[in-house]
Image: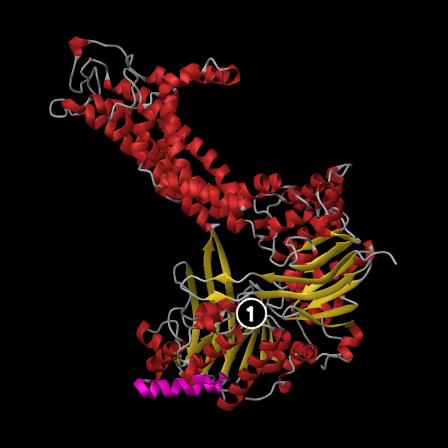
Amino acid sequence: MSLFKNRLAAAGAVVLLLLAVVAVCAPWIAPYDPLRVSLPDALLSPSGAHWLGTDQLGRDVLSRLIYGTRISLVIGILSVGIAVIVGSLVGALAGFYGGWLDGLLMRFVDTLLSIPTIFLLLAMIAMDPAERLQQLETVPLLGGVCRAVFAALDPQIVVVMSVIGLMSWMGVARLVRAELLTLKEREFVLAARVLGASSRRLIFAHLLPNAVAPVLVSATLGVGGAILTESVLSFLGLGVQPPTPSWGSILNEGRGTLGIAWWLTLSPGACILVTVLAFNLLGEGLRERFARR
Amino acid sequence: MTPALLEAIGVSKTFAPRERWGGGVRAAVAAVHEVTLALRTGETIGLVGESGCGKTTLAKLLVGLTAPSAGEVLMQGRPLRRLRGPELLKARRSVQMIFQDPMNSLNPRMTVEETLAEPLLIHRVAGDRRARIQALLESVRLSAAYRSRLPRELSGGERQRIGIARALAVEPDALLCDEPIASLDVSVGAQIVELLRALARERRMALLFISHDIRAVASLCERIVVMRQGRLVEDAPTDQLLAKPCDPYTALLLRSAALDLDAVPAL
Amino acid sequence: MPLLSVKDLRVAYTQEGEPVRAVDGVSFELERGEVLALVGESGSGKSSVALALTRLLPIPPATVSGLVRFDGADLLSMPLEPLRAIRGGKIAYVFQEPATSLNPVLTIGEQVEETIQLHTGARGVGATQAAVEWLTRVGIASAEERLHSYPHEFSGGMQQRVMLAMAMAARPALLIADEPTTALDVTIQVQILRLLRDLQRTLNLSMLLISHDLTVVERIAHRVAVMSEGAIVELGPVAQVLKQPAHPYTQALLRARAAMTLRSARP
C-alpha cells in the first residue's frame, strides 16, 4: 500500500494493530486477574513475577495495563466516532443548505467552541450522568437500546465517551462544512443536480464521500486527543471509576506514590505516550497520502 | 408550432452588490442581460463568447442550476421555476449537460459503472441495467473494459466521453455542452466534436454548444449566437455569419480566430 | 555556429516507482534570429525540454542528461552562479499563466525594475525609465502610472504583456515561450502574437516557441519540431512540414486542425 511509503506512519499503524490485538486478547495475555487484590504483594517493584510491579492493592500493573488498553481504545475510537457522525451531519447540513441554517448552526458551533472544554466536561460529569442514564432504562424504546449498550459497556464509560465525543464534534463540523462549500461547486455535483439527484443523494453519495479525507486525518489525530482527555478525566477522578483499570485511572492511583513506586506512573504514562504518538503518526501519514492525490 | 425544447425569454441574472473586505463595494454585476434564445428539436446552435461574457451563467440558467433575476426559462413550454418534484424530474430527462473540466466532471470515488448507473437509478429506468450501461459505453466508442475504471485512470478525452454517456443515459432531447473541449488537446477535442456530431444526428438530439473557440462551433453548428458582456449581439446561420457578420465584434472574433495577425493594428 | 545546440537531451523521473522518460533523446539546433516551434500534445515532453535547458527542473526527482550548448557554453554542467546570470538574462522565459508568474504583493513597477536591475545593472531613475520604455513598447498605455498598479488590477492579456516586458528588458538572445497565449481570450491572443512577431522581427530575437496550436506555429515560426512521447518525430521548415507531413502523428495533428477550420476563413 502506498501509505507505507511513509515509514513513520507505517510504524504507527503497526503499533496500533498490536494494541488492538492486545485489547482483544487481554484475557489470554494478561498474567494475572487485573482486579485481584493481594495486599501482602503491595507496591512490589518490577520483577520476574510481576513484570511491571504491583500497585497499592497488590494488583499486577501489567495486567491492569493490558485490560486498560481495551478501555482506552474503546473510548478513544468510539468518542471520535460520535464526534465524526454528529459533526459530519451538522457540517453537511450547514454547508449544503447555506443561508439561515448555516448561520444558525455555525453560531451554535462557535458558542460551544468558546466554552472551555474542561469546565464543560467537569460540569457534565458532576451532574452524575451515569445515574441518570440508568434511569433511562425505564423509558419504553430508548430503554431497550440503553440496556443493550450497558450490557456491553459500563455506563460510566458510555458517559465519558459521549462527553468527549460531544466536545469534539464542532471541529469536524467546521471541516466538513468547509469541504462541502467547495465541493458543491465542482462539476460532478452540478452534473448530478442536472440529472435530477435529490438533496439526500447529493449529500450522501457525492459530497460526504469526497469530504472524507480531511475528516479522516482529523479523526486519527482526534483519537489521540480523546485518549488524553480520558486520562485527564480519570486522573481527576471523574472518568472511569475504580476498580476498572484505564490508563488514566492507573495514573491517578499512582499519584501519591511517585517517589517510591515510579512504575505506577511511568508504565501508564508510557502507554499513553506511545498510543497517542502512533495515532498522530498515522494521521500525518494519511494527510500526506491524501495531499498527494 | 410545438413549443421549443428549451427557451430563455428576456432572461437576466444579476449578482447582488457585495461588501468587500477592507472596504469598497463590488458593484452589481449583470452577468446575463435580457437574453432571448430558443432551442428546437434537431437544431445545433453554437454560443460563442470570450471569458466573462456570461455564457456559463446562461448555461446554468437554462438547465435550472440557478434561477434568473428576471425573465423566464421554459422547458418544453413550461416555466422551469414552477416545476417541482416528479414534474421537475421528468423535465430533466429532456435537457442534459456536459461540462468543461474533465478533471472535475466525474465523481472521483465512483467507478464508470456507478457513474453511468446513477441517472438510471434517479429516473428509475426499467430494464437490464448492465445492458444499458454497455450500450452507453458503445455509443461513446468505449469498450466494456471501462466499466470498472475510476476517473483517475482515464484520460481527459475518455472522461469527457463518460460525461457524454452519462448525459445520454436519460435519452435527452437536447444536450447543452459547456466548453467541452477547452481543456482537451486539439486532436482529442476534434474527436469529441465528431462524436457529438454523430450522436446529434443519430438521436435527433438538439445541441447547444458553448465555446470561446468559434472554429469548433462553426464546424459543428448550423446556427451561431454571439455573446458579449451578458448580451447576445448576433444570431445567424453559420454560413451567413462566417461570410458576412453584422456585428463588428463578430467580425473581430472571426479575424482573431483565424489568427490574422496583420489585421491587428500595430502599436 | 548556432546559438543553441541541443544533443540527445534526456529527462527522466520516477513516478510511483516507475521510471518515466519525459524527454527521450531530443536533438535540435537554433540559429540566431530564428523561431523554432515545438509542437505536441500535453505529455509529449515539450515543456520539459524548455525547463531542462537551463536546469529549471528540480533535479532530484528528475535526471537530466545530454548536451546543451548556448552561445558556446555548456549549460548542463555550468556552475550555478553563471547559470543564474543567463537565466532571465540571455535566456528569457514567458510561461502560460501570467497570473501565477507575477508576484501578487509587489507592484508591476517593482517587478519589472527588479529584472532590469538584475540583468542590466541600471539603478534608480535609470531602471524606472527603462521599465516605462519597455511597458510602453509592449503596448501598455500610460505606463508611468501603471507602474504603481498591482498584478490583479490587470487583465490576463495585460499581465502577459508585462511578462513579455520583463523578459525583453534584459535584452535576451533567446526567448523561450511556453504556450504564451493559450490561456488568453482569442481576441487578446491575436494581439499578443502580433506583439511577439513584431518584437522578434525588430530585435532579431531567437525564439523557442512551444505550442499545441499549429496555426500559431504557422504565423510565427520558421521551423517546427513535432514531438510525441518525449521524442521529436518530425523537424523541418514550417511550410514544408505543414504541407507534406511525413510522420503519421503530424498528419493526425493536421487532420484535427482541418476538421475545425472556419469554412470561409482566409488560409
View extreme (bottom): residue = C202
One can see residue A154 in this view: no
Image quadrant for the N terminus of chain B?
bottom right
| Residue under numbered circle 1 | C183
Image quadrant for the C terminus of chain B?
bottom right
Q: Main secondary structure of the magenta part?
A: helix
Residue C100 screen position, x and y as percent? 45, 67
- A234 or A23: nearer the viewer: A234
Residue at 52% across, 41% down: A92
Q: Is residue A252 left or right of residue C20?
A: left
Q: Which residues are magenta?
A: C124-143
Location of residue B180 with respect to B132 vertically, above or below = below
Residue at 72% across, 57% down: B72
View extreme (left): residue = A259
Q: Is residue A11 left or right of residue B227?
A: left
Q: Residues within 10 Å of mark 1 (few under 14, many from 20)?
A: some
Chain letter of the residue beneath label 1 in the structure image: C
Location of residue B174 with respect to B25 vertically, above or below = above
Residue A134 screen position, x and y as percent? 41, 15
Q: Can residue A190 be found in the magenta stretch?
A: no
One can see residue B219 in this view: yes
Q: Secondary structure at mark 1?
A: loop
Total numbered badges shown on the rendered structure:
1
Q: Quadrant of residue B200?
A: bottom right
Q: Quadrant of residue A241?
A: top left
Residue A252 screen position, x and y as percent? 22, 24
Q: Can residue C140 be found in the magenta stretch?
A: yes
